[in-house]
Each structure stands twice: as structure tokens, then as C-alpha cells.
Image (cartoon, grey):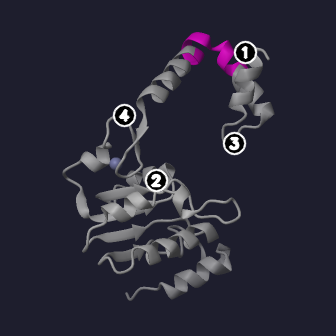
Amino acid sequence: MSELDTLIQLLAKLPGLGPRSARRAALHLLKRRQSLLEPLAAALAKAAEAVRPCPICGNLDTVLPCAICRDPERDDRAICVVEDLADLWALERTGAFRGRYHVLGGTLSALDGVGPEDLNIERLVERLRPGQELILALNATVEGQTTAHYLAERVAGRGVKLSRLAQGVPIGGELDYLDDGTLTAALKARQAL
Ligand SMILES: [Zn+2]
């Protein structure tokens, strides 16, 4: 197989890219050798060499433990559990949370054969201290909620305060457009004015 075929096959494995868009991306890269292809190749090599998962929380960083675990300004009393790094980044963009994180690396799924031992759960249980709040910021999917239930059972009796993200009406959302499940959740989680 030629180098070009290999490049296209690898690009096609990226999320959101199929064989057709992978061919277009490969052509795009080859046409921009100096401005894109070579810097990208160098950045990939550097990332592969330097970026590692944090042994405490599972976040990715070039220095271990990661910047969030090292930050003395952050509040040790709250750990926010997320499914993936993308969720950690999303929460960090809000600037609304100043505690620590724990990245599970997926969710429990009987269908896909993902069990507790496949996720970063043991390290979470080990790092928990009585009096801490554990915020389960998992996706509002069947897998996310199954994982939240499992974690709640797993940490029961350890003196940890459990919470989860609220579900309901999104900012700027119109009631008429919401699905029944979201609307029901919003009604149940209503707040006093
Ligand atoms: Zn960390």
C-alpha cells in the first residue's frame, strides 16, 4: 500500500471523517505541505511523545500530575466526574467549577462489553476522602445514568456527598420545542422563586 493510501486510511478513522472526506483532507494537506502538512506531522509527533494521562485524575497533560491536580488554588472538597476529556474541557470553558476532576474514560455499557474494570473507577474510589462532594457530571444517556448509579453504589458509606448536574430547560430554550423527557425532568427539578 502506498504512503498516500495509508494516510487516507488513517484519516478515515478520525471521528466525523469517512473515506471520501479523508481523501479530501489528504489532498488538502499535500497541497499545503509547508503551511499545514509538515507542522501537523511535527505537532502529532510531539503530542504522541509528550502527552500522557494524569495518574490521579485521567486528564491529559505534558506534565504529571496534570495542571488541574497541581493547582493549589483549586478546591479539594469537590471532585467532578466526567465521561471524557471533552466534557472536562466543556466544563472548564464555563469557568464555573474550581474543584478537581476525574475522567472515567467512557461509560458502562453491557452492549459494548464495557465493565467497571475498563474504566478509571478504582483510582476514583482510592482518592475519595470523607466530607468531599462527588459531582456526577455524566451524560443524560442510558449509559451515563447506569454509570452514575453504579458509582453511587460503589462509594456508598464513604461519607461522600453525591450530586449530579440538573436536567431541564436549556438557556434560551422554548418549552414547545423540548422533548417530553426533558420537560418532565425540568418540572421535577423546579426551583422556588
Ligand atoms: Zn490530574
The residue closer to the viewer here, 126 or 77, is 126
The residue closer to the viewer here, 170 or 72, is 72
Furthest toward the left, the residue is 72
**Residue at screen point 63% across, 14% down:** 32
Question: Which residue type carries mark 1?
Answer: Glu
First in sequence: mark 2 vs mark 3? 3
**Residue at screen point 37% across, 65% down:** 125
User: Label 3 crowding class (10 Å Cα cut-off): few <14, some 14-19, many 20+?
Assistant: few
Q: Secondary structure at mark 1?
A: helix
Q: Closer to the camera: disc 1 or disc 2?
A: 1
Residue named by callout 2: 90
Residue 67, magenta (yes or no): no
Residue named by callout 3: 16
Quote the CA–CA distance across marks 4 and 2. Answer: 20 Å
From the top left corner, tell me how far across and down residue 58 is, in percent: 42, 49
From the top left corner, tell me how far across and down residue 73 is, in percent: 19, 53
**Residue 173 appears in the figure:** no
Residue named by callout 1: 3
Label 2 CB sits under 8 Å from any ligand 1 atom: no
**Residue at screen point 77% across, 20% down:** 5
Residue 27 lies in quadrant: top right
| Image side of residue 177 versus residue 189, left or right | right
| Image side of residue 84 versus residue 62, left or right | right
Q: Magenta part of the protein: which range?
A: 27-37
Q: Look at the picture and state if 145 lies above or below 24.
A: below
